[in-house]
Amino acid sequence: MFGYVTVNRPELKVRDLEKYRAYYCGLCRELGKYGISPRLLLNYDCNFVHLLLSSFSEGEETETRSPCVIHPFTRQTSVSTPWTSYAAAVNVLLGYESIKDKKEDGEMFLAEVPLLVWKKAYEKASSVNIWVTGVLRDELDRQRRLEKEETKDIDLAADPSGKIVRAVLDYQGQSQVLSELGYHLGRWIYLADAYEDREKDRKKGSYNIFNLLEGNEEDIRERASFNMKSSLRKLTLAYDLLNIKKNREILDNIIYEGLPGKTEQILKGKKKNESI
């Protein structure tokens, strides 16, 4: 997961943005239980997991106000729910695999931290949910094989990511609706990341599905648009069937405005980093 699943801030009410930030802070604090460095793995996608899975029951959330590492002189509101530890474990699992890929690709930044530090956190997170860990390993292995084979099939290339996010959201395999939403969200994330990174990957000689497709730039953009928007439609249809009991305004903002807005931003070649 890459941090693409976030709110459209200008269209979110102040109180809802504050609640979104509180969930984000709650996830950050939970990551602190894995050590200092794992907090660097915090991303918007996993906060969406935190927020969504916490929204199927009324109450069951605890608010606290205290200083934090980033804001040591002011008290920040954070929210924790029965799903906070699960979302933090998912964040660590996905973050660790991302760091491994960065090291293999020769990228630095987070990869500069010794992998052993991240591995200890990964092993601890694995014990929280063995099911997700197993799916993650299997599907990432399959994705690496597909990349080595240089598949030109968009559906095949995006399938492992779809199955990973499906396992994350429908961790017990009991909800067809969450399964559908998770699969197409994962597929969308993969395509968004690949389309945004196509020039960087071309220069590095790294695999990128969009660099292997035939046609001019406009043809490739149209194929990317069709596939990304197809998954957006399907995940939105699934979302509409969910029985959301709280945080509806925030989740609606992400699904109906955040994801479509991010799609258009990426397709237009605009890069925008926002902090909350």
Image (tube, rainbow, N blue to C red):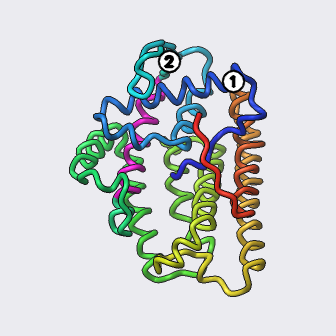
Give the main secondary structure, helix, strand or loop, of the magenta stretch. helix
Q: Residue at 73% across / 79% down in the picture?
A: 217
Q: Is residue 261 above or below residue 34?
A: below
Q: CA distance from mark 1 to mark 2?
A: 15 Å
Q: Is residue 87 above or below residue 177?
A: above
Q: Residue at 46% across / 36% down in the picture?
A: 87
Q: Amino acid at mark 1?
A: Asp
Mark whose residue sits in front, 1 or 2: 2
Q: Secondary structure at mark 2?
A: strand
In the rendered view, does 188 fall on the left or right side of 225? left
> Percent x, y for residue 78?
50, 20
Q: Where residue 76 is drawn, which disc sits there?
A: 2
Q: Is residue 98 above or below residue 250?
A: below
Q: Give the extent of the magenta segment.
A: 82-99
Q: Is residue 90 magenta?
A: yes
> Which residue position holds label 1?
16
Q: Is residue 192 magenta?
A: no
Q: Residue at 75% across / 61% down in the picture?
A: 230
Question: How would you rate the neighbour count of disc 1 (Cα within 10 Å): few for under 14, some for 14-19, many for 20 or more?
Answer: some
